[in-house]
Amino acid sequence: EVQLVESGGGLVQPGRSLRLSCTASGFTFGDYAMSWFRQAPGKGLEWVGFIRSKAYGGTTEYAASVKGRFTISRDDSKSIAYLQMNSLKTEDTAVYYCTRDIEYSHGIYYFDYWGQGTLVTVSS
Amino acid sequence: DIQMTQSPSSLSASVGDRVTITCRASQSISSYLNWYQQKPGKAPKLLIYAASSLQSGVPSRFSGSGSGTDFTLTISSLQPEDFATYYCQQSYSTPPATFGQGTRLEIK
């Protein structure tokens, strides 16, 4: 059974850093791209960024709103994807989800499994 | 970025009703359109991918159609567990993957 479990959320002051983890099980983690999304309280879904599988270079892409502040990485030996969040702002407050990405055409993905989410609150 | 617009934003319906939700893209996205269901306090769940392909395990009362810029999600006979918020999402021009604003389906 595919499972994704996020951890590392919590309350953090503006300007500080936080690292989220997404621990995967039930599939060959290294074969898949992984994405991060977020959802501010009462709002819709926002894509944060993703990391390709090593077969595609393990490269990353980010939303404009987080580029330069957030970094996604992966440890295929541990089946974990990370979201390092620096210089946090109050507007980064949200539930953060990781997903497994399915490539259904070259470079085109959909998101078939989602973790349960972890809440990040940025406040002084 | 491609903008996705859903209509209606909210909808009241009864158990057994047939319901249709529409999603429009700001430019052609071929058939690279996916639908998700989200219940309060839960993660989104994939229902439909590639506009009309039913994700494994999803009941057959859910169906999707469309291509280009206009898409629909249809629930043929609403069940109590279907009351939720539904999002469309385009994969054609990524990054970024963009979502519609959501359609909240409520019990009448």
Image (cartoon, coloured by chain):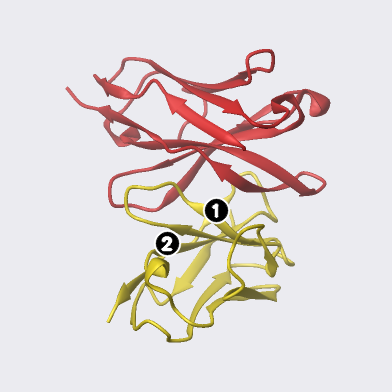
Type of amino acid at the residue the image marks with label 1: Thr
Q: Which mark is residue B12?
A: none
Q: Mark 2: few, some, or many residues within 10 Å (few <14, many ≥20)? A: many
Residue lying at 69% horizontally and 32% vertically, measured from the top left:
A27
Which residue is outermost to the bottom?
Answer: B17
The hue used for chain A is: red
Chain identifier, colour yellow:
B
Of residues B58 and B33, the one nearer the viewer is: B58
Residue lying at 82% horizontally and 46% vertically, measured from the top left:
A106
Which residue is outermost to the left?
Answer: A124
Alpha carbon distance from label 1 to label 2: 10 Å
Which residue is outermost to the front?
Answer: A1
Of residues A63 and B8, the one nearer the viewer is: B8
| Image coordinates for residue B84, horizontal then vertical, percent | 38, 64
Quarter-wise, where is residue B73 in the image? bottom right
Circle 2 residue: B101
Quarter-wise, where is residue B63 in the image? bottom right
Of residues B27 and A42, the one nearer the viewer is: A42
Circle 1 residue: B98
| Image coordinates for residue A19, horizontal then vertical, percent | 43, 17
Horizontal placement of B78 versus B28: left or right? left
Type of amino acid at the residue the image marks with label 2: Gln
Callout 2: helix, strand or loop? loop
Horizontal placement of B67 versus B85: left or right? right
- Disc 2 sits on a residue from what chain? B
- Disc 1 sits on a residue from what chain? B
